[in-house]
Image (cartoon, rainbow, N blue to C red):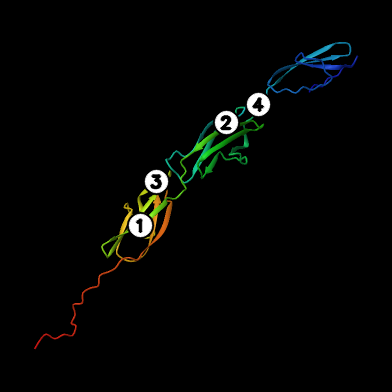
C-alpha cells in the first residue's frame, strides 16, 4: 500500500505503477513472492517519485517431513507412528500434525491398532501443508483360531485330547501354546492324555498373549472295576 500526496498539480488520475507495470488508480498491489518491488507515483503534470520496498515475509513453502517411523518390532499389539518435521519459514503451527485426515493436534505421535496405510500431514503457521504416507503391517491383535478338537481312546481308561490351531498371518503360536486347564498350566504339545470324564477347558495362545478358548467334554472313559478279594461268606473247611 502506497500513501502519497502532491501539493501542487495533484496526483494523476492513474498515479501508481508497480515494478514498471501499467499505471493504475489503485495504490495497492498484492504480491505472492518475496523480493524487491519498485513503486512509482506521478502527479497530474507527469512528475514522478520512485521508491523501492523489500518484501521478505511471504511463506509459500511447505514444512519438511524428515521422518515418519513406527515400532520396528516384528509384531506388536499396537504401533506408534512418530513424525519429525520442521519449517524454516513461518514455523510449525502449534497444532501442526494430523493423522489419517483427523483433527489437527500438537502431538507428533499417533497410536494405531490396525494394519494399513496412514497419511501424515504437517502444517506451518500460514497453512502450508506437507503430506506423507506410511504403511504399518506388524500389528497383531487377532487371537489364534482353534480349528478342531478330537478325542482318541487309549484303551478303556484314557482319552487323548488333540487340538488343531493356528495364528494365521499373526505373530504365531507361543512356544508353550496349549493349556487344558483353562490357562493354569501350559505345554508345547498340542495333546493331553486324560483319565477322567469331565469338561476340559482348552486355551491356545499366540506370541502376543492373545488367546482362543474351547470347552471339550470327555465321557467315554470306563474304569475297570477292582476285583473283590474279600470273604464272600463261603466256608471250604470241614
Nearer to me, 94 or 217: 217
Residue tagged 3: 172
What separation in Å lies between label 4 and label 2 (alpha carbons)? 14 Å
Which label's residue is closer to the chain start, 1 or 3?
A: 1
Residue tagged 4: 60
What separation in Å lies between label 2 and label 1 (alpha carbons)? 60 Å
Residue 69 position, x and y percent, is 50, 36
Task: Identify the residue at image location x=42%, y=56%.
Answer: 213
The quarter of the picture where the N terminus appears is top right
Question: Quick check: marks 4 and 2 in contact, CB under 8 Å?
Answer: no
Nearer to me, 37 or 201: 201
Instruction: Give the quadrant of residue 201.
Output: bottom left
Label placed on residue 150: 1
Q: Looking at the image, which residue sits at the far top?
A: 46
Which label's residue is closer to the chain start, 2 or 1?
A: 2
What separation in Å lies between label 1 and label 4 (alpha carbons)? 68 Å
Residue tagged 2: 86
Amino acid at each position: 500500500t502506497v500513501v502519497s500526496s502532491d501539493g501542487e498539480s495533484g496526483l494523476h488520475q492513474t498515479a501508481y505503477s508497480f515494478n514498471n507495470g501499467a499505471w493504475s488508480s489503485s495504490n495497492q498491489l498484492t504480491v505472492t513472492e518475496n523480493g524487491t518491488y519498485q513503486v512509482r507515483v506521478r502527479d497530474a503534470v507527469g512528475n514522478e517519485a520512485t521508491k523501492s520496498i523489500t518484501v521478505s515475509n511471504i511463506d509459500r513453502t511447505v514444512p519438511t517431513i524428515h521422518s515418519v517411523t513406527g515400532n520396528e518390532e516384528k509384531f506388536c499389539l499396537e504401533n506408534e507412528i512418530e513424525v519429525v518435521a520442521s519449517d524454516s519459514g513461518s514455523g510449525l503451527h502449534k497444532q501442526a500434525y494430523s493423522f489419517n485426515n483427523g483433527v489437527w493436534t500438537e502431538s507428533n505421535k499417533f497410536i494405531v491398532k490396525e494394519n494399513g496405510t496412514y497419511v501424515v500431514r504437517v502444517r506451518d503457521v500460514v497453512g502450508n501443508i506437507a503430506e506423507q504416507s506410511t504403511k504399518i503391517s506388524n500389528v497383531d491383535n487377532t487371537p489364534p483360531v482353534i480349528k478342531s478338537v478330537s478325542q482318541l481312546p487309549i484303551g478303556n481308561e484314557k482319552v487323548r485330547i488333540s487340538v488343531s490351531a493356528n495364528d494365521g498371518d499373526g505373530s504365531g503360536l507361543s512356544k508353550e501354546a496349549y493349556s487344558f486347564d483353562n490357562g493354569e498350566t501350559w505345554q508345547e504339545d498340542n495333546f493331553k492324555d486324560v483319565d477322567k470324564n469331565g469338561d476340559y477347558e482348552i486355551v491356545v495362545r499366540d506370541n502376543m498373549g492373545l488367546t482362543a478358548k474351547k470347552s471339550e467334554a470327555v465321557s467315554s472313559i470306563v474304569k475297570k472295576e477292582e476285583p473283590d478279594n474279600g470273604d464272600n461268606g463261603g466256608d471250604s473247611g470241614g
